Image (cartoon, grey):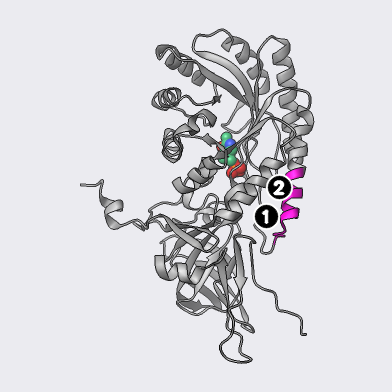
Amino acid sequence: MSPRKPLGLERSPAFTYHQPTSRIPFRKPPRVLRAEEVSLAALAEQYGTPLYVYSATAIQQRLATFDAAFSTIPHTVCYAVKANSNLSLLRMMAKLGCGFDIVSGGELERVLRAHKKAAKKVVFSGVGKTVEEMKFALDSGILLFNVESESELWALATCAARMKKTARIALRVNPEVAAETHPYISTGMREHKFGIPMSDARVLYSRAAGIKGIEIAGVSVHIGSQITDPEPFRLAMSRVTDLVNYLQAEGHTIRFVDAGGGLGISYEDTPSSDPTEFAKYVQSYAERVLQPLRGLGVHLLLEPGRVLVGPAGALVTRVLYRKQHDGKLFLIVDAAMNDLIRPALYKAHHAITPVTLADDVPSEVADVVGPVCETGDFLARDRSLPKCEEASLLAILDAGAYGMAQSGNYNTRPRPAEVMVEGKKAKLVRKRETMDDLMGLEE
Ligand SMILES: *Cc1c(COP(=O)(O)O)cnc(C)c1O
């Protein structure tokens, strides 16, 4: 047997190539990229492009693996809604027992619409909660407010006291841990707008004690996003543990430690998609988080976003035009920075692979760009890809997190539809936007 050519890029169990059986002897038809057991070409045909496609099985497996890694301690996984806030996805998460980390009243509304009883497992993060959002959260009976400043604490106390309610709070402390990630998504240092410095936190906890409307319940951190080295998490948790010990000695009841989110994924072209590799990775993260906490007797809250849904989603796009000048090749596709902003915003790398892949197609180097009128509107630069003709389909991988969630309507472009696949079944979970959706609010 001759050595097999590389299969192209895959993300098992979400996206793998399927070899259709040949009708012509000795002629192999091209392989087709599938979401679980559904052809992406068929989905693009039915729902149009650009199209977000998610794998329910991949999300379920990742959540189960993540959850299992923390089985030695009482804990709740509060999925970070901002990573992907589609209602069907939230409903699935809630049914699997997830709580939610929210950063706005809008996200709370989504959680409640997804699952009526989900509020009691909601933690509310964010530096700029409005009084209206606080009222809404208090009325809904959420689990915990992660308070990020002294002013916010007094606003929440006033609000809760007026409503004759009590807000359970944790202060989000800033552990001064530098994590290797893009500067826009690093949050754990003094110069960032997030959190309260450790020393200030001690004082603020003592001021908050006994204040009407406030119940001190925990300590919270979140050091950033897309962090793939687990060591900074251990450092952060050991600083949190010191604070918890101090607060308990001062007589505070600290029931919850919220470790935040931020565990990264590999955006490489061919990361290991072996489930045991993923389990090991999550395990090493869990060990680092848990090590300092042993014996503390707290309930651990976790706020993973990207790591649960990132590799479970792809953005399917069609090549509109091939354009060549000055020796440079552009593949102009129908998805753009308004649909997936990560490459433009963070220079993020997303693996891209053709939906149909024939043997012996030569590779070529191209910039994959969208139709938006910005030079920053690219999905990949100088990327080596199997040669693709006009009208062929490409899948932009690892787009399940911060893809649709960060999309917009720049250039008056309707946002993509979203489809959730499970096994052989595909369900439209968000319709493609219409011109009325875009202009209905305007005079
Ligand atoms: C964004 C965010 C998360 C989720 O981050 P991921 O990198 O997607 O895991 C969790 N907690 C807070 C407070 C956040 O702001």
Residue 110 falls within the magenta-colored stretch: no
- Residue 122 seen anywhere in this rendered image of the structure: no
List x then y, in percent, for residue 13. 63, 60
Q: Which residue is mark 2?
A: 228
| Residue 75 figure quarter | top right
Mark 2 vs 1: CB contact within 8 A? yes
Q: What label does residue 266 carry, if any?
A: 1
List x then y, in percent, for residue 17. 61, 71
- Residue 353 seen anywhere in this rendered image of the structure: yes
SS under mark 2: loop
Q: Type of residue at label 1?
A: Ser
Residue 277 falls within the magenta-colored stretch: yes
User: On the picture, is 347 further left or further right than 336?
Assistant: right
290 w.r.t. 275: above or below: above
List x then y, in percent, for residue 262. 64, 41
Residue drawn 76% across and 85% down?
2
Residue drawn 62% across and 10% down?
206
User: On the picture, is 294 further left or further right than 323?
Assistant: right
Q: CA distance from mark 2 to mark 1?
A: 8 Å
153 w.r.t. 48: above or below: above
Number of other residues with Cα within 10 Å of mark 1, as a class: few under 14, some 14 to 19, many 20 or more: some
CB at disc 2 and ligand 1 closer than 8 Å: no
**Which of the pair 38/211 is nearer the observer?**
38
37 w.r.t. 122: above or below: below
Quadrant containing the N terminus is bottom right
Specify start and end residues of the magenta stretch as a single range.
271-283
Comes first in the chain, label 2 or label 1? 2
